[in-house]
Structures are given as C-alpha cells and as structure tokens.
Image (spheres, rainbow, N blue to C red):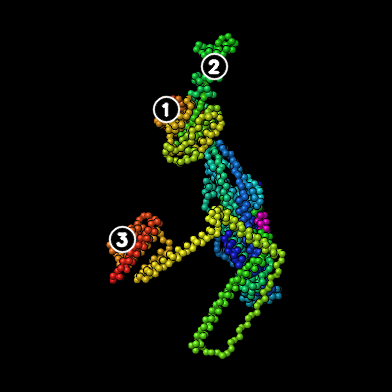
Amino acid sequence: MSGLATFLLVLLAMAALLRVDFFFYLLYLLAGLVVLGRLWAQHAAHAVASERQHPRRVFWGERPWVRLTVRNKGLLPLLWLQVHDSVPIQLRSPNFYQAVLSLGPHERVTLSYQLDCHRRGYYSLGPLTLQSGDLLGTARIDLSHATPDTLVVYPRIIPFTGVRLPSRALYGSLPSRQRIFEDPSRVMGLRDYAPGDSPRHIAWKASAACGRLQVRRYEPTVALDTTIFVDLCRGSYSPMRLWVATELAIVTAASLANWLVERRQAVGLGTNGRDPLLPGDGGATATETLPYPPTMLPRKGRPALTHILDLLARVEMVDGIGLPALLRRETRRLGWGSTVVAITGRVDEGLFEALAALRRSGFSLALISVDPSAQFQAVRRRAAQLGVPAFEVWEEADLERGALALGGWP
Amino acid sequence: MTAPRRSSDCPAPAPGAFRRSDALRIPLIASMMAAIALSAGQLASRVFPGFDPALLALMAFLAGLEGIAGDRLARQFPEASIRLRLHFSEWVVLLAALRLVLSLSQGPEAFAAQAIGWWAHPHTLLDGGLVAAGVLLATVWWLGIQMSRCLEALGPEADTPPPNDSAAFYAWLTRPLEDRPGEARERLSRLIFAGATLLLLMSGLARLDLQLALSLRHPAVAGIVGNALLYFLLGFVLLAQGHYASLQARWQRQQVPVGKVLGRRWAVLGIVFALGVALLALLLPVRPSLALFGAAFRAIWGLFVVVGQAGLAAVAAVAYLLEMLLRLLRLFPATESAAPPPPAMPAPQPVPQAPPTGWWEAIQGLVLWAVLAAVVVYGATRFVRERRGLWGMLVAQGGPLAWLARLAAAAGRRLAGLRRAAAARWRGVAERARVPGHAAALRPRLRWLRPRTLREHVWLLYLQTLQETARAGHPRAPADTPYEYARRAAPQLPEASEELQRMTEAFVSARYGPHDPAPADLAPLRAAYRRLRRACRHLLAAGRDSG
C-alpha cells in the first residue's frame, strides 16, 4: 500500500507536534492494523497443509478425480487462500485448477477436479501453489507445496478376438493344430488302436469296456512364451506418421501383452525407446551407447502385465539404436522356442537379416508393421520365405477388426 | 464447506452504473467527507465563535453524496459540454445551499438582516466565509468523487468471456491485462491518507492554543477525537472492501471459483480484527510517547541553546577585542556614561505539571514496553532464523566480538588504503598541474575518477610511462606508433629499455587485443613502471648534474 509509511510518519510528527493524545491512539491503531494484519496472514498461511489424492495408474480413456485436501492446522483463521494446482496439458485444459477458499481454525476443505486421460504417459501433478494475504493488501504470501505425485496413464488396450502367433514351446495351454505338440495331461477323447500307437497311450479300462483296444487322444497345445520388441527409434518411421505410428506400436504391444496374459501365457517386453525414469537417460543423441530400458523376460500373471504397461506408458521415442541391433543384443537371454514379436515401422534388409538369425537360433517370430509402405506385400513375401508371419496395422481400427488373427502369410 | 462457485457467474455491470455494493460504499465515503468537514468546522468555530460545525459536516455529507451521484450521471454523457453544464448547475445549487447554511448558522435574526443586505447589495453574497467554506466543500466533493471512482475501478470488468468451448476462450483467458484494480487500490489508499492528514491537521489545530503550538511546551490535549476515529474506521472498511473487490475482480478475470463463505467471513473477520486491534491500542499508553518526544525536543532545544550561547560568547569576545583595538588607536570615543541596565528577563511561563502516575498508566507503560520488546525479539529472531549460517560462522570465528573487531580492523585498513590512494592521486594531479600545458589536459582525465577497467589501467600506466620519458627528454612524436617509439627511445634509455618494451607490448595488447589483460598482470606492470620512472629520474638528475 503506497504512502502508508509516509502517512505513519506524518501522523507521528503531527501527534508529537500537536501533542494530541488521541493521535497517538490513532497511530497505534493504524500501525497495529497493518503489522498485526501481516503477522496474522503470515502465520495463518504457513499453517496450511495440503494433500493430493488420486489413483496412481489409470487406463486410457478413464476420467479420474483428483482430490485436494487443504487443511488449516493453526488456530488463526485464514482470510483467503487461492489454490493453484498445475496439471500437464495432456490431462486437462486449461492445464491448472484454481479455487479460492477461506479456512477457519482447523478447518478442512476438499476440492475435486477431473482429469481427461486420453494420452498415455507418465505425468507429474503439481506443484500446488498457495497464495494468501491480509485484509488491506499490504502482504502477499506465496507458498509452494511440491509433492512428488505422479500419474501413469496406460496405453489403450484393444481386445483381440484372436491372434495367430507361431510357437515351438511344448506343454503350454494354447491349443495348436500341429499334432506334435500333444499334451499328455490334456485328454480330449479315445479312438481305436492303430498300429504304431504307443502302448503307453492305451486306455486299458476303456479297452476292457469296449472289448477292443482304445488309445487316448491328447490335445495338442503349445506354450506361447512371447517377448514383444517395440521399435521406438525415430528413424524407423516415416516423418509424416511419426507420432501416430509410434503410438500405434505401443497400443499394439499393450493389446498383445494383455491378450497373452489373459490366456495365461508368459509375456515380456523389450524396447529401444527412452524411459524417463531411468537415471542418466542422456537425451536424444544418435549414438549406439544410448541406454534403453532393460528387457523384461517373459513372465506370467497380472504383475507382469502391470510392469509391461508401466513401461509402455512411460517410454518415449528417441534417436537410438535400431531394432535389428536391439534384437541381436536382447534375444540372447530368451529361451529356445519362445516367440519374438517385432513391432516396427520400417522393415528393411537389416531387419530381415536379424530375423533370419533369430529363426536359425530356434525362435518363433512374428513381424508387425505399424507404418506399412505400398510394398508391404513384398515384405510379407520376403518374411514368408523366412517363415515369419507379417502383419500390417495401419490404425487402431485394424486391431479391433482382428488384423492379427488373419494369418500374416501372403 | 460448500462448493466454490465461479466468480464470473454474476453478470458484470456497465461502467458507471450503480451496484448493490454502492449502497454501502457511497454513504461511507460521504460520512468520511463529513468527518473532514467537521474538523474544519471545529477549527472555524475557534475563529468565529458561534459557528456550528455540524451544519458544515451535514453539507459535506450531502455534497459527497451528490458529487458521486452527479459524477456517475455526468459520465453517462460522452459530450464534455453536457458534463460541464451539469457540474456548473450542480455547483450553483451547492453554493446557494452553502450560503444559506452559513447565514442560518448565525441565527434567524442575522439571516434576516443579511438577506435584506443581499437584496440591496448582491456582492455581499460572496464573503470570506463563503469562499473558505466553498474551498473546503470543493475539496471534499472532489475527494469523494475520486474515492468513488477508485472503488468503481476495483469492481469486476464489463467484458464477458467467450464460451468455454470456443477457440477464443483460451486467447481471452491468457490475454495481457492491465493492473487496473491494483492502481485503483493504491490511489484509493493515497486519497484516504491525504484526507486523514487534512482532518488530523485541522482537528489538532482546533484543539490547541495557537500561541504555544510551535513551542512544544503546551500541555497535551486529552480526549477522544470522534470524527477522526470515525474517519479511520471507515477508511479501514473502505480499504478492506477495496482490497476484496480488487481480488474478486482478479479472480473473475482468471475464472477462479470462489467459496461462498468468503465474502461473509471477510466482513466478519475484518470487523473482529479491527475491534481487537482497537482494544489493544487502547491498552497502550500515550503519555510515555509524549514524554519521549518532549525529552527529544528538550535535548534538541538544549543543544540549540548551548550552540547559540557559544556563538554569542564568541561574538562578544570579538567585539571586546575590536573595541580594545579601536581604543588603542583612539578611534573609539571613551564613554563615561554608565552601562545601560540589562534587559529584564521575561518571567518564565508556568509549565503545567503532569498528573501523578496511577496504576492504570503503569500497566499501560508495561504493555508498551512489552510490545516494544516483543517487536525487537521478533525482529532479531527472524533475522537470525533467515540467516541460518550466520550464527555458526560467528561462533566459528571466535564469537561476535572477535568478528566485530576483525570487521573494524578490515574497515580501518580499507579506509587507510582509500586515504593513501586519494593522497597519491592528489599528488599526481598536483604534479601534472605544475607541468605547463597539463592543466588543460587534466580536464578530460577526470573520467579516471570512475572505477577503471583492466584495459584502462594498462593504458594509464603507458601514458604515465610516456610522461616520464618525455620528462627525461625523449618525448614521443605524434606520428610514432608505440613500437616505433619504443625502438627509437630504447637506446636513449638503456636502464629502462626492457621496461619500456614491456609497457609497449602490454599497451598494444590492451588497446588493440581482443582479450582483457589478466588482473595478475597489473602488479608486474606497475613494478616495471616504477623501475622505468626511477631510471628516467636518474637520467634527468644526471643531465642536470652534467649541465
């Protein structure tokens, strides 16, 4: 308040010169109003505590509520308090929430606002800034409550009707058309004995009941231990579809992982993108030494899916190593016969060489292109020569239509 | 706690229109104007006994109300001529009413006599009283209008935001804003303080004996100045409400939801806080403050008396010596007449004695000292708390006293260094001034009084080098480049040829090089300059001896 100090001095001088008792009283009154008002505002504002409550992980498309609890821990009432909570622009527009309150002693107020989670990602909420002041506007108090609140928005998961992925792993739970993968623990019926049948498969009780030899028929199953490799190298995508295609790759990987976990299969994930939580992520330099998140080996169950979705939510595109190099490095630890699904935008000869090497090593392979070019049929033919089914996904609607269940062969 | 509502839900009024809050604000402003006029009336009643100050206060109240309403009405018209005519007619009515009030305040008989006089001599309508009261009325009229305008500017803006889902909404939300409420609030506070100063001045003058006003020895004036208290409380209410209105305007611009209880709580807490502070202020004593200022004034007065008496004694001594001298020269006639009797000292005025201190004043004194001690302790605590490392550093360096001693020693060294530098500079200036033609050249060099850069240090050393070599009889020709001059002068100065070469290289590097010289290079350069100067002076002395 401009002129207040000058006026106080003038008032003091007049009180001293004119020697009017009451002027001193007015001086005390005015000084008290200003000084005590400032002290009141400062002490009351520093006694404010805040807490933010929200779900830590949400699925794509959800609209979670964030609840801000503002509490006055002190005995002095808080005249006014402006609450400003910063929110990433991807989750809310405008990218903040504001409210003005007045808090009595020990009063607690809960404020709520909704987020719109339509972009997967790893977001920080806050900081929460509080602003207060006194009655006359002589003091302004700014406080910042920087709480490390994070929110993970999972990528969109599209339910599949079916996926045709090859596998060579025995004794799984997925039915197979190849009879060599019969599981002796899954009896699916009986038939008459034929020469060449193993005596161990003869059902003696049924044979006695029928009066002729019967053998058990077993269900052919495979285990689909799958590791999904998502290519997030910037150079693997056409510039026109860079953002769309990388997001489509992540949606495809998340949907595939979800489908596999629902069928109780083990699933893992590898990517050459950048995880912002990794220390020393180093920025986007096109060097071979750029770190990437460690590849998750195939695991079963919901916890494994949660970890995969967490990483897929966080991971970002980067100018890093290409998918062929990633496959060569990270498939060394995978078990023989497990399935490797490569999701990428650009399919070139280098990738085919890497796939051929993996094929020779005994892996079952599948190739999904999310940025297919006009020559995709040629790519598919070339992949078929290697025994690799190749799928093309142009948009999310393709996944909904069952693009991964249609074969992948020319 | 109810959910906050958006502050923009209420439609913003048009500029100049009356709002619901004006029903409180305008009478408040008019009451403050009446409080000022009451003080002026009390002062006038000292000069004109029988004058009723309440009538002037009533006039000021009405003029305040009318002025604010008239101003808002006039601002509805864009044409200046219409506004001027409105204000003119307004002031004709105000002055006529003031004339009637001033005359009626002297009684019905006097009013009747004056009315007859006005009929016969219309110029008697305008007298000194009317002019003085008119000036006062104009002051409070203007003050009230300005306060009202400030409060109006503190309110919500008239523009309505575009719909939330439109493309223009974000541009509207992030548009650059003038700090209109902030400026208006500052202006409002200045106006209130100006009015308070006027009021207090007139109230104080109305309560003391004008003859003793400047002596500070008049007795303290006790009693409550009701109109001043009213003005201050109303001013506090206006400032608090103005601040609230400016915050509301800001929140409205930012589309911030505001809690419903905020306005009511603001009013209640403001009233409770003001009453609490008023009661607390009542506990504080006034007389100790008066005594403090009285003691300070007596000290200043005593100092003034001592200085004055010393001056008088000095004048008397000079006069006595002069008289003796004149007598000695027989220029001063000897007077036989007796010295005139000393003037009679005026009888000291009786100083009213303060009443004996009672228990209530003792409690008040204790409260005052407790408040002062609390302020000092609080300030010291905050000072130390905000500088956490300070105390530890002081203790680590031997305690505060040792630190103070070191500080004083460092300050002493610094002062001594400054004194030496000033003396050296003065000697240099004096020496240069003695050289013919250097006085004129000295003037541009006043720029060296400012702190020099490192480059300038080197330039100065080189220029001083040139002065020394010139004194030694080897001046630099205007066409010489530095290196040419060094090559030419080096054989003449065999003892200082290395130093001259070094100074030349340093100068060329500092003058034309891309980088500043290092601070560590200055000391060797200065040493080289001193060696060169010594060599030049030896050469000069040798030349004199041989000559």
Q: Which residue is mark 3?
A: B497
**Above or below: residue A91 compared with residue B468:** above
What residue sits 54% from the left and 56% below the top?
A: B398
The quadrant of the rendering that contains the N terminus of chain A is: bottom right
The percent position of residue A310, horizontal first and vertical second, equals 53, 36
**Above or below: residue A267 compared with residue B477:** above
Q: Amino acid at mark 1?
A: Ala
Q: Is residue B270 magenta?
A: yes
- Confirm or deny contact between disc 3 and disc 1 (CB under 8 A): no
The quadrant in which residue B84 appears is bottom right
Q: Which residue is mark 1?
A: A357
The single residue placed furthest to the top in the displayed view is: A211
What residue sits 52% from the left and 14% below the top?
A: A198
> Callout 2: residue from which chain?
A
The percent position of residue B307, horizontal first and vertical second, equals 56, 75
Which of label 3 and label 1 is nearer to you? 3
**Disc 1 to disc 2, how far (Cα)?**
36 Å
State the mark number for residue A217. 2
Secondary structure at numbered mark 2:
strand
Q: Is residue B163 left or right of residue B280?
A: left
The residue segment tinted magenta is B268-276
* Front position in the image: B24 or A16: A16
Earlier-in-chain disc, 1 versus 2: 2
- Local crowd at mark 1 within 10 Å, few (<14), some, or many (≥20)? some
Q: Amino acid at mark 2?
A: Arg
Q: Are marks 3 and 1 on the same chain?
A: no
